[in-house]
Image (cartoon, grey):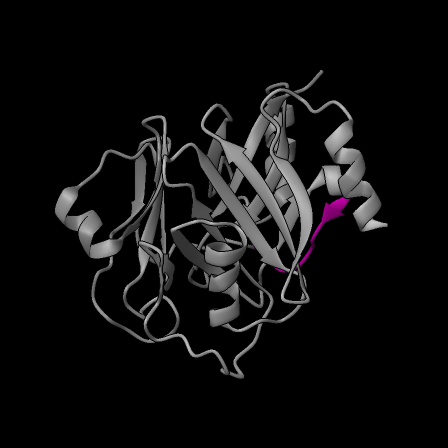
Amino acid sequence: MRRLLALLALVLPQAAGAATCRDEVFEDIPFTLCEVTAEDDLRLFLNGPSGPYGSFRAIDRALADQGQALSFAMNAGMYHRDLSPVGLFVADGVQEGELVTREGPGNFGLLPNGVFCWGDGSYRVIESRRFRDTAPACRYATQSGPMLVIGGELHPRFLPDSDSTYIRNGVGVSADGARAVFVISGRAVNFHLFARFFRDGLGLSDALYFDGNISRLYAPQLNRHDAGFPMGPIVGTVVQKD
């Protein structure tokens, strides 16, 4: 059924600025990906008038009051118990968290980590210390870790036979910065396989891990709305309602 819905999404008219989502298989593992171009209205979401949004549904309700809707969304980085971001977070030019460049515990501190940044007409995934040194202008930015692919190379700590497997999600960008591709695995995978899908399956030279285990996707064109406990940072495209 999901494959049929994906085929229909390719042939039916899409709302202007809507992300294009589809299913793919790589090394016998199913993945779902949503592709966004520089013309799309991609935003980061964290706090609403009453505190953190926490869910795709809450964001969609808030947008509906403005005659808008989510066309795609995904959790977009790690967060603390109060849903505040771990590391740098910038939404519509307003910074919520500070850049973290030191090594630390967990996946976030598995250096090199990185920042997904956009706002000047292109999407970029930038290693965190290079981000610190170059200070690029970002209307939107979210830091997470580890980096999955760095200049065409896999993160040096990834092991092909690692038995640490989770449902994982992340983002990769095209070399020209015109496309961002958001991916969630359909089954539990290790870091090495997940990173290879970005590099070898999608041909993307830079990619960043968002999270694992809590990974969720909102893709109405695939009839998908993953539910669960509250989320912190969320990334998504916004379209005008008909």
Q: Does the stretch in magenta take in 105? A: no
Residue found at x 52% / y 80%: 164
Q: Main secondary structure of the magenta part?
A: loop
Residue located 51% across and 44% down the image: 181
The reply, left or right, for residue 198 in relation to residue 222 is left
Q: Nearer the viewer, residue 126 or 41?
A: 126
The location of residue 186, given as percent across then percent down, is 67, 62
Is 127 on the left or on the right of 116, as rendered?
Answer: left
| Residue 226 is one of the magenta-drawn residues | yes
Q: Position of residue 6 (x, y in %)?
A: 76, 42
Q: Which of 216 and 199 lies nearest the eye of the viewer?
A: 199
Residue 54 makes an appearance in the image: yes
Q: Is residue 51 visible?
A: no
Picture coordinates of residue 9, whole percent (x, y): 75, 34
On screen, 236 above or below 98?
above
Q: Quadrant of residue 79?
A: bottom left
Quadrant showing the C terminus: top right
Residue range (magenta): 223-230
Q: Position of residue 120 (x, y in %)?
A: 31, 27
